Image (cartoon, coloured by chain):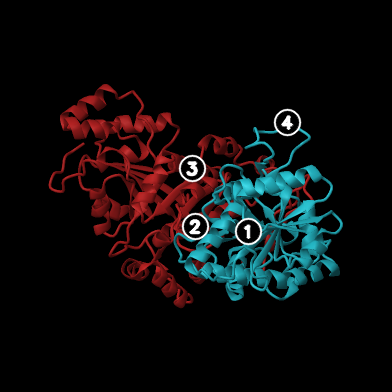
Amino acid sequence: MNTDDDVKQKDPSRAVVIAISHDAVFDLKEEQEPKAPAAASGVLNPGPGFPFVKAVQRVNEKLVEKNPNETLLFDVILLSSKDRPKSQSEVANSIKHYGLEITRLCFCNNENFTSVLRSNKVKLFLSTNTDYITKAQDTGVPAALLYGQRGTATLDQLRVLFIGDSLGFSEDTTDRPKDEDTGEDQLQSVQLTQSSLEDLVALIGEMRRKFGRENSPLCACLMTVCSPRNVCVRALKRLRAWGLEVDEAFCLAGAPQSRLLAHIQPHILYDHGLQYTLDVPALS
Amino acid sequence: MSLDSRQAVATHDGRADASVAANGDSKGSWGDTEDSYGHSGPVNKPKSGAVRRARKVEGGIFFPKPENAVTIAVSSRVLFRTETEQKVFEERGVEEYLKYQVEHENEPFAPGPAFPFVKALETVNSQLRELYPDSEELFDIVLVTYNHAHVGVRLINTINYHNLFIERFCMTGGSSPIGYLKAYHTNLYLSADAEKVREALAEGIAAATMFTPEKLIEVSDTQLRVAFDGDAVLFSDESERIFKTHGLDKFFEHEKEHENKLLDHGPLKGFLEALGKLQKKFYEKGHRLDCPIRTYLVTARSAASSGIRALKTLRAWGLETDEALFLAGAPKGPMLEKIRPHIYFDDQMFHVEGAAEMGTIAAHVPYGIAQKHPHKKDSSKSK
């Protein structure tokens, strides 16, 4: 693990650690023609997760502005593969070049990345790869999809979207959709991730409360995709009970998702089991 | 929202299997079912296709696709009465306002000016569902508000309290709702905020501003009645411009000269068209005389002269209104009081206010030349 000495390390007991794969933050395509000329030699182009990192940085800045001794901050770490030594130095260079506040670079491979997440006390894992997201969720680490429309995502405000269809079900599991593949293991993993999700939501809620309703650098949104309005309201109340008052709420009740998402422009989309975000383009 | 793409679907109306094919669902047996929320409707078949898992619509409630339905977006301030809360917002700011809303979360709001209209839309829907159980050509009412989601709980509690069938909503937390209107293929947007309405009109979405009247006369609960002014509402404001700049005589001259030239369309032409399509569905099932939708043209034009151009234009567009009232400049209030529409659209505040004084639910369409040259109250010219 590499730590960047220039970036101040966060208080491990309070920091909200977010892990993001380095190939989401930077554009690492070596196989094909680069889409755009590199920013400088040895520096990579921004990837879909780049706006997220910048927006998170702004939240931290604003938090510290309010309280210079603030310990409840976002702590972004990069997950990197050991297999490509060339890209490692490019990643390090690029981090410096763009002034990204990334405290650690963790090396892992496909098999052990979930244990790397746990050992780093990662509260949220972000990726554009739905398989990795599912893997992380199955081991109890909340994981969300990076929703990226390069070039149009805002850097001024971190926008987090929760898909609330499963949040809005009552405790009675007979309320849940009857699904052929919902087995015992699935339910267990849901419960496991649910409590870590609760922690994450509480922390985001605490951060959100430090800012007013308007001009906040952090914005939380809730969307239900195919449920009636009362499910959406229950999800709202559940998030509120966990400590987060969302700013924006959308109940689609079956209306097509993608146009609305394109307008909402979240940086990240949290959907447990990825059941409700089948049509979402992670990259565009 | 482009009307053309919707027209392509709507021409298949009346034939259930065609409309099913149009939205891509697999054909299957449809049956009515009562779900746990107390709503009944046909069971929606899951979409088949190359996705990992078919997405089921929860609870068996039938949600039409926005592009197939006639989508009406209403803001919270016109659907319900929120004057007290508005005052809190204006006097004490957004944080106090939100606190107040949350504190009063379990107190439902009273009905607002758009409420009777929405109820009437639901009446039409239930009849359409009876006649065409498979069809998605229904009214779809969406609550679009720039309120923060804090207020959401109170709004949904109110919807539940009044038993409204509104399943879709959009609480934008302070940002402009206009982009969301387009994402929902909105056919008509009703708001209390004239600025937002103007923005919507500029984007080609039919929109009107509603005001809370002091008294409200009773309207029908079996028939939806929608009344439209002609110039600058159904038609463009071109003739209005002539009248305002060159006076009445020039106006008459111009209209006579161009009697056979079609007027250009106005912002609410599309909505009249959408109503017409639904009316035809009732006619096809033998409900012409007792159609639950009735439309009215209420214009200051006069039947013998300038009105002819208006009628010819409507006919050329393939549109009609059930009744056309040519008032030749007489005040609209008494006529509207007889009609009792659920909503009346006019581009001139003078007429909107006049109608509201007599208890008619009137909505202002801030379009065209009348916005720059408001009508003087003491003049009453024949058109």
The amino acid sitting under disc 2 is Thr
Q: Chain of mark 1?
A: A
Q: Which residue is mark 3?
A: B274
Task: Label 3: state its secondary structure.
Answer: helix
Task: Say whether residue A159 is left or right of residue B76.
Answer: right
Q: Label 3, label 2: how many angstroms apart (C-alpha)? A: 27 Å
Q: Label 3, label 1: how many angstroms apart (C-alpha)? A: 60 Å
Examine the rendering and report whether any part of residue B208 can be seen.
no
Instruction: Categorize mark 1 by other alpha carbons within 10 Å: few (<14), some (14-19), many (20+).
Output: some
Examine the rendering and report whether any part of residue A177 can be seen.
yes
Disc number lying in front (4 or 3): 4
Q: Which residue is mark 1?
A: A7
The amino acid sitting under disc 4 is Glu
Question: Which chain is red in the picture?
Answer: B
Q: Which residue is mark 4?
A: A33
Q: Which residue is mark 2?
A: B172
Quarter of the figure with residue B259: top left
The amino acid sitting under disc 1 is Val
- The residue closer to the viewer here, A242 or B47, is A242
Which residue is most to the left?
Answer: B378
Task: Label 2: state its secondary structure.
Answer: loop
